[in-house]
Structures are given as C-alpha cells and as structure tokens.
Image: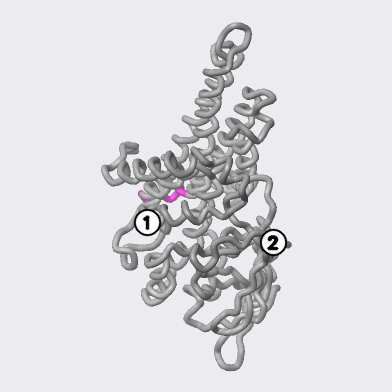
Amino acid sequence: MDLSFSETQIQYVETVRKLVKNEITPHILELEKAHHFPWAIINKAWEMGVINLSIPESVKGFDIDIFTTALIIQEISYGDTGISTSAMCNDLANVVISQHGTDEQKERFLRPFVEKPLLASFCLTEPGAGSDNSLMTSFIAKRDDGTYVLNGAKCFITNASYASQFTVLCKVGKPASNFMACVVIPVEPVTSVELPDVGNAPREIDVPTGGKIIIGKPEDKLGQRLSNTATVTFEDVVIHPDQIIGDRRFGFKYIVDVLDYARPMVAAIGLGLAKRALDVTLEYTRERKQFGQRLCDLPVARDMITTMWKKVELAELSLMKAAWKIVTKADDAGIYASLAKNTCAEAALFCANEGLHLHGGYGFTTDYEISKLARDAHIIDIYEGVREVQNMIIGREIV
C-alpha cells in the first residue's frame, strides 16, 4: 500500500490549508456565533476547485479520485466540520448521478455545478426511516401520461434551505413497495446573490415541472452549526422519466453505492476534527501553567495527550487503507470503509472530549474552540450509519 502523495494531491492539500488558515480558523468562533450560512467560504472553495469533487471528467474536464477527495475533505474539516459536511453532501447528491446516470443526465444535472457555486441535497432519511431504509414512505406514483408524482417528507437534509437540486430516494408505486427509485429534481438555481441567508425562515419552492417543495426552518443543532439542515416535504412534485437515475427498481443498490462513497468522507471529517482538537489542546497545555510547570509537562496530562496522538495516527492509517482499497477496487473495500468511519469517529469524540477535559473550566465556555469541537464531534458517530451499523457490516463479512 503506497501512502505517498502525488504532486497533484500535495497541491490540493496546500490549497485547502491556505483556505482554512486564512478564512476559517481565525474566525471560526465568530462565524459559528453569528449563525450565518458560510456562503463566502463555499464560494471561495468553489473558485479553488475543492468542492463538487464527485463530478466526472466528462463534465468537469478532470477526475478526482476517492483518495484525493478524502484528503481535501479532511483538510476542510480541520477548519470546520459543518462546512465540510455541506461540501460532502453536495457530493452525495451528485455521486449517484456520476455513477449511474446517462451521459445526458450527467450533462444536464451536473453541468450547473461546474458553472456556478450551487448546492445540492441528498434526500434519504425520513422521520420514520433512519438506519432502516425499508421503512421509507415517500414514493412516486405513475400517471396516465407516463410521468410520475412524488409525495413524502425527508428530515435532517443538509443544504436543504439553499439547494438548487434535490436527489431523492423514494419507493415506487406505493409506500409499502419493495422497489426504490432515485430521482433528481432541479429547481431555480440559487447562489449567495439570490439567497444570501434564510435565517430561521422556511422556504417554499414551486417546481418547474409541477408541484411544490417545502423546506422547514433550519434545525437548531447541538453542533456543526455552519452546515444547514432542514426537513424537506415534496407535495405532488411531477417527475419526468428522464429525471429517474438508472433503473427505477434499484434504489437500494444506489443507496449502498452512495454510502460506500460517504463513509470514507465521514471518516475524513472525523480525522480532521480529531487533528484540530489535538492541536488546540497542545497549544493550550503548552501555555497553561499549573504547579509551577506547563500543563503538558505534568505526567497525567502528557499521558492523555499521547493517547490522543495515537488515536489520530491510527485513525489516519485506517482512512488511508480504506481509500486505497476503494481506489484499487478491492473486494473487501466496504468493511474497511466502515472500519475507517468508526475509527475516525471514535478519534474525534475521544480527542474533543479529552481535549475539553484538559482545558478545565475554560473548555466549558464558548470562548475556547475546544467546546465547539466537542459539540461538533457527536454527529460524526451518527450520520451515514451509526457505529452499530458499521459493526454489523464488518461482522457480516468477517464471521
């Protein structure tokens, strides 16, 4: 397994580090407290070519492999995991089109993201269907004219308030159907110019083909406050056959494909946060003095910092191996993606929580970044498959 970086990968990492250093980390606490959507950073990332990473060469002019994508997402996450989650979810909405769409669909649905800094939403989770997608009730019903009508509700949808396109997984024919389809719904494109900030307001969209999409007010979340999350309700949305990606019966397979792509990305988000938690803790404990010496020189503190460092290193190795397995199309790539997701999420939680502990009372205030990191870390263990689901995937393969 070759872990050396190519010149292109090094250039991407250096580009993102510059963005993070100049635009994110110096202002992160003010950005979070302001509760404004970070359009300015999204726009700069788009200009630098470090979002919309899953769009294929046929549309964008070049490809970015999963290994490089993970490096980019990790570096953005070092600055803020809310921003990297918004970027990743753009890719989740688009990767299924890249993998299973026709050439015409790729051009139609992905070209706008190359031309403007637009956002997309991947609509999978429902109020009654989290880890168990079979409980999904949103569905498309065929009409006499050959078109379909989509009805249903989704929850915890990233980028929803600002999305210009929705990739939706839904049942076919009726809520109890065993078949699932993937449909794409483009709406009137919005950028930071047309929709700078929704605040706490809902958003109602008239769909060009017919019907409405109603976006609930943004969720007030524990962490990752710089990513937008809201409910999405589809009311009699008309779907033409050319908006259905691949085979309308194979949606469950497409979910698996998207999640196989997503898990290394979530691992990269966790790793980026763990690294940041370690660094801010090192900085604090090198400056803080107790009992006549630096806090980091006290044996109990040094032991904890060493454990944090080991967690980060092991998490990085697990992510690199998972990415390598995926790039080389190994048969067991899936279990290594699940392993990386769990390992990096655990590292994020451990480093953020122990880092907060080492900050003492100061870590419990919002004046120190470690408190934000501790809040942000919890969702990494949950989205795109909780740790128990990842363990089920691994256990099914190795036992």
Q: Is the magenta stretch mostly helix, strand or loop?
A: loop
Residue 382, position as x, y percentages in the image = 63, 47
Give amino acid for label 1. Answer: Glu
Give the residue furthest to the left: 7
Residue at image mark 2: 129
Q: Residues within 10 Å of mark 2 (few under 14, many from 20)?
A: some
> Which is more N-terminal, label 1 or label 2?
1
Res 252 quadrant in image: bottom right
Up-down relation of residue 69 to residue 242 (above or below): above
Picture residue at 47% right of the left edge, 55% below the top = 42
Q: Which of 330 and 377 is in front in this view?
A: 377
User: Helix, strand or loop at disc 2?
Assistant: loop
According to the picture, the residue beneath numbered tag 1 turns out to be 47
Furthest toward the right, the residue is 128
Colouring method of the image? one colour
Identify which residue, 370 or 23, lies in the foreground. Answer: 23
Could you say where residue 314 lies in the image, as x and y percent from the top left?
48, 31
- Work out whether 219 lies above or below 357: below
Which span of residues is magenta-colored? 328-333
Q: Which residue is drawn at 49% across and 54% down?
A: 88
Asked whether residue 329 is drawn in magenta, I would say: yes
Q: Say what amino acid the circle numbered 2 marks.
A: Ala
Label 1, residues with CA under 10 Å away: few <14, some 14-19, many ≥20: few
